[in-house]
Amino acid sequence: MGALVLDQSVIAGIGNVYRAELLFLCAIHPARQARSLSEDEFALLWSETVRLLRIGERMGRIVTTDPAEIGATRSRMKSEERLYAYHRDVCKRCGSGIEVLKIGGRPIWYCPSCQPS
């Protein structure tokens, strides 16, 4: 999934940050094969992609965290509060260590607890 999400011929506009965050939010391990996704998982991935890109356009920056989890509106979040997995050491949701894989020639950060293989 990690390589497919970055493939601009499949879906344009998804860079490395969105890739890590989308797969985190959908609980999809980045090394998982795309053909193994169920219709429901694909629908969730698609709806989250649309939602996050709209938020990013409106805010002028990438914000993927839920304001309720942070206790602040998106506009008041500090930069380190705006992302769940990308470039983090510890998972914001479960506290597990974030791991890094190299997929599609780029590193991807993921939580092995929240995104099991």
Image (spheres, grey):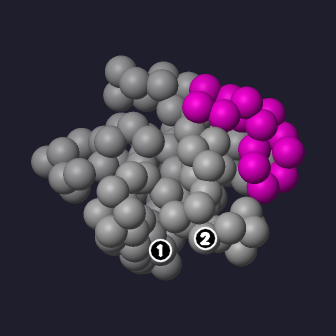
Contact check, label 2 and label 1, Cβ < 8 Å: no
Whether residue 16 sits left or right of residue 113 in the image: it is left
Relative to 117, residue 89 above or below: above
Residue 56 among magenta residues: no
Relative to 103, residue 38 above or below: below
Q: Quadrant of residue 39?
A: bottom left
- What is the number of callouts on the image? 2
Marker disc for residue 63: none
> Given the current orientation, which residue lies at the most extreme right position?
95
Whole-percent x and y of residue 36?
Answer: 47, 58
Crowdedness near tag 2: few (<14), some (14–19) or many (≥20) residues, C-alpha within 10 Å: few
Rendered residue at 53%/59% (across/down): 64
Evaluate whether residue 98 shows in this view. yes
Residue 96 among magenta residues: yes
Whole-percent x and y of residue 31?
Answer: 52, 38
Q: Quadrant of the C terminus?
A: top right
Between 117 and 78, the one lying in front of the other is 78
> Given the current orientation, which residue lies at the most extreme front position?
76
Whole-percent x and y of residue 7?
Answer: 24, 42
Instruction: Please give the range of residues in magenta.
Output: 87-100
Rendered residue at 29%/63% (across/down): 57
Residue behind mark 2: 73
Q: CA distance from mark 2 to mark 1?
A: 24 Å
Whether residue 66 sits left or right of residue 13 in the image: it is right
Evaluate whether residue 25 shows in this view. no
Whether residue 91 sits left or right of residue 34 in the image: it is right
Residue behind mark 1: 44
Between 32 and 19, the one lying in front of the other is 19
**Could you tell me which secondary element the residue under label 1 belongs to?**
helix
Magenta span main SS: loop
Crowdedness near tag 1: few (<14), some (14–19) or many (≥20) residues, C-alpha within 10 Å: some
